[in-house]
Amino acid sequence: MARVEKTNKLGLVKDDYQARPTTLCPGCGHNSISNQIVQSAFDLNIAQHQLLKMSGIGCSSKSPAYFLGRSHGFNALHGRMPSVVTGALMANHTLKAIAVSGDGDTGSIGMGQFKHVIRRNVPFVYIIENNGVYGLTKGQFSATAEEGLELKHYGRNEMPPIDLVLEAIISGATFVARSFSGDKKQVQALLEAAIAHKGTAILDIISPCVTFNNADTSHHSFPYGVKHEVPLHEIQIIAPDFVAPQDEIEVETYEDGQTIEVSMHDGTSVLLKKLDKDYDPRSKAQAYAVLEEAQREELFLTGLIYYEEPRPTLPELEQVADTPLALINDRPSKDKLDDIMKSFK
Amino acid sequence: MARVEKTNKLGLVKDDYQARPTTLCPGCGHNSISNQIVQSAFDLNIAQHQLLKMSGIGCSSKSPAYFLGRSHGFNALHGRMPSVVTGALMANHTLKAIAVSGDGDTGSIGMGQFKHVIRRNVPFVYIIENNGVYGLTKGQFSATAEEGLELKHYGRNEMPPIDLVLEAIISGATFVARSFSGDKKQVQALLEAAIAHKGTAILDIISPCVTFNNADTSHHSFPYGVKHEVPLHEIQIIAPDFVAPQDEIEVETYEDGQTIEVSMHDGTSVLLKKLDKDYDPRSKAQAYAVLEEAQREELFLTGLIYYEEPRPTLPELEQVADTPLALINDRPSKDKLDDIMKSFK
Amino acid sequence: MAVNLPLEQESATDSKPIVNDFAFSVATQNGSGSQTSNAVLVRSLFNMGIPVNGKNLFPSNIKGLPTWYTIRASKDGYVARRFTTEIVVAYNQDTVTEDIKNTPPGGVVIYRDDLKTPPERDDITYYPVPVRKLMKEANVARAFKARVENMTYVGVCAQLFDMDMDVVYQSLLDQFGGKEKPAQMNMDVIRLAYDWAAENLIKSDPFRFETMNGTAGKILITGNEAAALGSVFGGVHFVAWYPITPSTSVVDDIHKYRHLRKDDDGNYTLAIVQAEDELAAAGMIIGAGFGGARSMTATSGPGLSLMSEFVGLAYFAEIPCVFWDITRMGPSTGMPTRTSQGDLLFIHYLGHGDSHHIVLLPASPEEAFEFAWRSLDIAEEMQTPVFVMSDLDLGMNNWMADPFEYPSEPLKRGKVLDAESLTKFIKNHGKWGRYMDVDNDGVGYRTLPGTDHPNAAYFARGTGHNEMAVYSERSEDWLANMNRLRLKMETAKQHLPQNIEDYDANKSIGLISFGTNEPAMVEARDWLKNNGIESNYLRVRALPLSKDVFDFINKHKTIYVIENNFDGQLDQIIHMECKDNLTHVKSLTLGDGLPMTARWIVESIEEQETK
Amino acid sequence: MAVNLPLEQESATDSKPIVNDFAFSVATQNGSGSQTSNAVLVRSLFNMGIPVNGKNLFPSNIKGLPTWYTIRASKDGYVARRFTTEIVVAYNQDTVTEDIKNTPPGGVVIYRDDLKTPPERDDITYYPVPVRKLMKEANVARAFKARVENMTYVGVCAQLFDMDMDVVYQSLLDQFGGKEKPAQMNMDVIRLAYDWAAENLIKSDPFRFETMNGTAGKILITGNEAAALGSVFGGVHFVAWYPITPSTSVVDDIHKYRHLRKDDDGNYTLAIVQAEDELAAAGMIIGAGFGGARSMTATSGPGLSLMSEFVGLAYFAEIPCVFWDITRMGPSTGMPTRTSQGDLLFIHYLGHGDSHHIVLLPASPEEAFEFAWRSLDIAEEMQTPVFVMSDLDLGMNNWMADPFEYPSEPLKRGKVLDAESLTKFIKNHGKWGRYMDVDNDGVGYRTLPGTDHPNAAYFARGTGHNEMAVYSERSEDWLANMNRLRLKMETAKQHLPQNIEDYDANKSIGLISFGTNEPAMVEARDWLKNNGIESNYLRVRALPLSKDVFDFINKHKTIYVIENNFDGQLDQIIHMECKDNLTHVKSLTLGDGLPMTARWIVESIEEQETK
Ligand SMILES: Cc1ncc(C[n+]2csc(CCOP(=O)(O)OP(=O)(O)O)c2C)c(N)n1
Ligand SMILES: Cc1ncc(C[n+]2csc(CCOP(=O)(O)OP(=O)(O)O)c2C)c(N)n1
Ligand code: SF4
Ligand code: SF4
Ligand SMILES: [Mg+2]
Ligand SMILES: [Mg+2]
């Protein structure tokens, strides 16, 4: 913090990637994620005007006001961010978008849009800041709360949790990861890969609500996450024009046969160092199996769960012009209208 | 048809289970399903006043007007049948309900309610009459249409299809089947098991739209279904107080080791005679695997895909009184109010 | 236009020939192919130069239920729905009894001879058609027989009422997009029936057609196709939608003309997305509007209800986007295939909290086209959602129209700052804030995402905000914003289509109406005049109401507000917005699901005036 | 009540003691525990017999943003929000400058001595409180220190303004549900501050409290809790909801009292389901209403917008169910923690097509309780959705009230036929149809699913239907149904809470208002009277408007319609529904997010009257 101010390739300091001060609770997991977004954007030399920040409604969805102050943003409606992102990116498909949602915003009211935006493969980073509760409305169970969770005002949760990673995969997402807001290194690596991905990239990040759901035993609490997180792999991103600033991880430390290299469309490589499991995120069958096991055994597995060579994105399918639609300023000619009118006579 | 009118245990003839004449297109798959519902209700000696018919909006959703004329029914809103069923069954949890939806009704506008009604385990039979198109609005692609399907007015479908069976399983459904409206025997067996099931029972029945999506190559067409259907098993239902009227299938014909017996809560047995695959519907991992394979290989597998001993239903979780709530006619006593008022002084 | 009253109330039993001034009702089954035969009838009359309308009264069903098609020919150019139809074509067993019962005295019934018909009436003329026999003779492949059966009544009508067979063939060709093979197959059946009728039927009714010059230069088109064309020529970039009757063909037709929006690389400058529901469709066009695209959707009542929350967001975050409501009969799912003007009040104030929306009210295909491109301009100029409320009658029926005029101006994109003009703005005003009102017209300057300027970004939101678009819970900020929005709506009035007024200071009765009541209004005024009741007329073309409406009201002794909904919603809006003494304003409403007729207007006003 | 004007406009600089007639504003941080300290202050005054209100002005945030709490003590029983607050407790660095600026001359500022404050004003009295020092001395475990800091101002106020310390302790105990340990811990801090103030502060302001007898028999309760109790005592069976501020505590409190709805087996006769969104919540209560249960939901603007389509279905299929709208500030997400009456117009006509809804408008906890149980009766009697529109001010603030009266009648379940009565009905009327209007009141007889009778079943739907509930597209059926629904709304008026009128034929000014403006209206009328402007008053308690409103309007020379929204929505509804000459009806609106004050009303009317 007290270091000399470092500038990135755009000549910006990290502070230039900040925005208004957070109004979330001190210690809220969402704040760490905002910080990771700032860090990643700085590291990746992102030109902020080429990025959109989008969100729904919730504590999580407030957070885009607290990062990337030079990016256009839209704090939309509860559960409806995906449709708004879709439209915004159709208006200008040359932009990137980072969207933030909550588990209530995505898993409850937003379930339909979540599934369908993935199906359309709208190219953006979809972050779910998952805390198992409705923070902003003061601590009701969300649809990702584990069965048996007890909360102060709302008693015991009797419903089985929704697994948003599994949901994303079966909806056709080509980049799906789970992480933990306390695991900054992993969050940042995944973020960087997700931004490079050409398609909907889903990041389900367990992000504790320190005010309403932070008991040691709660599956979405900070202590639980620290204690139980099992990363499937260590992740290192090797971008064609980018060297990761965290010099702690070195490519060489990964031994042969111990890594999986996932090459992305834009030349970025995601290097996964196997840890506990012999897990290849490029197999849907393995993904189903490992998630089924995680669910059954209540394991908190993190990492890049599923990756697939991306399908065409929605703007591609629609054969959208290279120039952003927003900047097209013409109408068909008068001749064309006259011809059509003749056909009606 | 020209037989002597048979009566069931309630002294009713099959005709007593009919309702208004169908206004769907002649040959529509939905009509066969209506007929199977009539047949099953007759066979199962169902007292129609103990059953609810519910639906959303669509050709499929119109069909409850064409069966079980002595049951109360509610033709609700597009995509919103699940919530209406939930309320109706909470008002009177002693009733059974058969609900009909379409692939548009469930997979598009209704995705959220579909997932959440399953999560709550509202005990009813949820039939999706799946034809890959919007029938009533004249032939747009639905979310279950296969990639590459070509339709007269709407060109080529570029989106991957949603698999509603997979969706149902990951949402926590405890009875999930797929069938084909042309396979009357199987539809009827599944219906009977589903009615006996204590929990949300999902039947995804491919039900051709002969007007808008019936080309030989279309995955939801009649010719395709007839040609490609691969039943996972033959099904026979043995109810404690019921002998199946289709005497063609006999229990004895199933050899040892060739059958799986799934015992249901109310004493009904579902006997599955293995066919091609060695498939046990009581394994979620197997269900994922077989559905993943079906998707990858474009197989049309039918049968009981997943079964699980049912979790508590929503009325049970809510500890609802034995008497239907609708019939409770009292308020708390005056003493209680006075006590409470004292506490506010 | 010469005042020549329709014969609705007279009986047609005298033998004087009635030429080019009567109506048909064709009763068939939905999905039986009668759409084509009816279209051929309409187009043939049109091509004979006879002013005509055709209105489809169809069930919410794909195949098999009764459907009626009414065709009116009017040498005087009246194209409103006719209350009575002199010629009844009864081709449906399910309705034949009622169809014959509804035939006016002196009328004609043309019916399939294999229908069981009620006992014969002696005040009408019957012409049975031996459909089966004719079809047996017809040289048509088995698979097609059912589909072309209905051509038999075309042939019979052509013979009985003197239609030009060349014109009929030409109309068939048009109908099949110039493809001769199917046209010929159908023509054979028509010819067969025509010849049979010539030999076997004895003409004993007074009705006939005669070529005239009443449609020269005109086109026949549906309002939905006009809306689609207007949108494409209005430079729309992005359409998101969810299918719903009767709006579906708006987007289908945009698809049809999408090829007009290709750039030099052959890529599209117009994208169309079928959303998973109306909430998503609304969200998408709002996102696109925020992103700087001209965006629109088309829906009907139920979809509109679902969009309520999003419309409130667009209003409050000030996002340009266009909503077409092709109204059908509500409340609720209602009658999806019947027309109505019942969403007016709901649209105008759509959303919780204090909100108001611009609503354009087209009355014809010309206006559907014009309002389509203008709505995109207005939305961007006013930075707000704009609604266009058409209806099933305009949207799905073919209307006679003048060829559309090419938009007179280039696209108006409203106040958008690019990097350069933003720099200038900041220089002039010290700073830029998304909702600063430097022009005192209530409209701020916006920037688009992607603008390469360190100060270009802002955070759009539906929450309370100050002029810098920063979240605020301060009462002053809230009120300042609401006051600016009110001013903006005032400004908007200058950008909206002007109302159309026919005023003469000598008349004390004023009629106010809007939308597709127009043809009935025109006819009814002539009729009333003939009956001694003269009236002025103002047709409202946009909400919020402008001052001329209130002036018009104040200049009359009696005002009738005439509309096709149950509650009299325009009348309600007038009362809400004009706080003058309105005791002389009377509401006349219908709302039976059908297009309005002149007769109903005339009767309603006469009843009031003679009270 | 003696007319004794509030001192709002006078300065309080003279030294005459001001007793039980001034207001506090306490500025703290959200989430800092100030809810408890403020509640203790309010409850202590209440327990001293002083009429009091407490209003929480909090941000849409969980922790850390500025929040204000205003407390008004009024010996005359005025419980409206006060425009000015004489005593300012400034405990928040972020707002201290503005808080001090807003203190009226003669006022008092009590502030944490570690805040950076602006230069001292000499027209107000300052009392610094050494919070850190006191907390160091306090015998409180480290973990709790931050949470009890705010008790220091309670102690200081108690000392400065003469509050009874036994009463304060009792209030603390109440606050902690009788638990002595936390009460004692907090009391220690209060006592410490109290003693410190006694020794160190020199009282130099005129404000003080004195025990009186103004709250005997009263209770203090929020409107949401009253609504919850009313619903539970109204026999509600089924609640479905989705959390949204400020309605959440309605359902939380129903949960709290759910134990009152157990049967002999210990099972519940009331089920509560948290839905996945408001669409589902609406669908569930409609399903439950259809199934025969008394059902309800609670929501606010955005949720209401989402429910639009379902509300239309309930209206048209005639399903009983109750919707509570605890309004907050819209349009859109707006200001979730600010109050408003801005949903009135939207609710009353909610849904596309021609629809209208019953809306009850409670003004007090007593009415929230009563309308809660009555709404369930009305919904079942009228077979239609019933809305209760409360607001954040009533819903989330503590109000003084009389203890609630136990419902005087047994549950009214409306016209429901069981198997036996259905047989009788068929005998009498030849047949039974769900929508037959045999009583000529527009209300049919319904059967519940589960009724063991071969003719009991019907098919509910949102599509057009005839009286047998069979699908119909006939205009006659549609119009008959719409006319019956209109008649039903007329019938409903007799079942709704009557408006409350204070009328005297000698007065020519009439005031009309509704809901939580009531306390400000009461105070303003006294104030106006004192200033020579006498007025009559009608408080609307339900929509659709009944005839007495129009009679009241017609009996006055000037009418003011006073409401807390931007557009004057009640005024708009009056204009829509009453077609008399209304040029003398004037709309006064506020809509700044805060509860209405008497001062604003007085000023607004005086401005008009002196024009
Ligand atoms: C339509 C609508 N319904 C309800 C709300 C109230 N609301 C605001 S945030 C929220 C839940 C947020 O939960 P989540 O998405 O998990 O975000 P978190 O606060 O936990 O980060 C709800 C229900 C709303 N704003 N809009
Ligand atoms: C809110 C709303 N949007 C759109 C419609 C129009 N609509 C009626 S049915 C339907 C699709 C039905 O498709 P599906 O559920 O697959 O049923 P099918 O007709 O194919 O059996 C649509 C979009 C509607 N009734 N309500
Ligand atoms: S309430 Fe929970 S989710 Fe919301 S800001 Fe506080 S800690 Fe974060
Ligand atoms: S359109 Fe298709 S789905 Fe609808 S009734 Fe006809 S065949 Fe069935
Ligand atoms: Mg959450
Ligand atoms: Mg379908």
Image: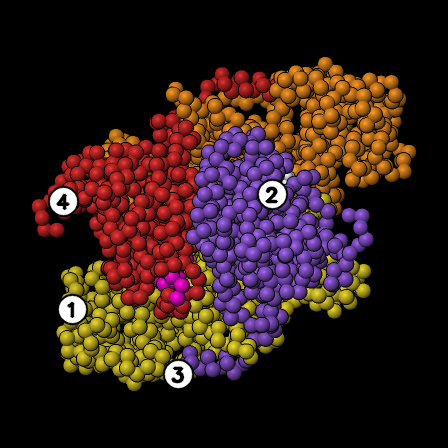
Chain colours: A red, B purple, C orange, D yellow
- Residue at 36 percent across and 41 percent down: it is A174
Mark 4 and mark 3 residues within 8 Å of each other at the beta carbon? no
Q: Residues within 10 Å of mark 3 (few under 14, many from 20)?
A: some
SS under mark 3? loop
Q: Quadrant of residue D115?
A: bottom left
The type of residue carrying mark 3 is Asn
Q: Characterize the local packing of mark 1: few (<14), some (14-19) or many (20 or more) Cα atoms within 10 angstroms.
A: some
Residue D56: % across, % down: 34, 66
Q: Mark 3 or mark 1, which is nearer to you? A: 1
The percent coordinates of residue A288 (x first, y second) are: 39, 49
Circle 1 is placed at which residue position?
D113
Question: Residue B250 at x, y = what percent?
Answer: 66, 55
Q: Chain of mark 4?
A: A
Spatial separation of the CA atoms under disc 2 and disc 4? 59 Å
Q: Is residue C197 above or below residue D51?
A: above
Which corner quadrant of the image does residue B49 belong to? bottom right
In this figure, which residue is indicated by the disc labeled 2? B207
Prevailing SS of the magenta stretch: loop
The image's mark for residue D213 is 3
Direction front: furthest residue? B256
* Amino acid type, residue under disc 2 in the picture: Ser
The amino acid type of the residue labelled 1 equals Asp
- Chain letter of disc 2 in the image: B
Q: In the rendered structure, the residue with mark 3 lies on which chain?
A: D
The reply, left or right, for residue A43 in relation to residue D521 is left
In which image quadrant can residue C382 be found? top left
Q: Chain of mark 1?
A: D
Q: What residue is rendered at 26% in x and 67% in y?
A: D32
Q: Which residues are magenta?
A: A134-148
* Whether marks 2 and 1 lie on the same chain: no
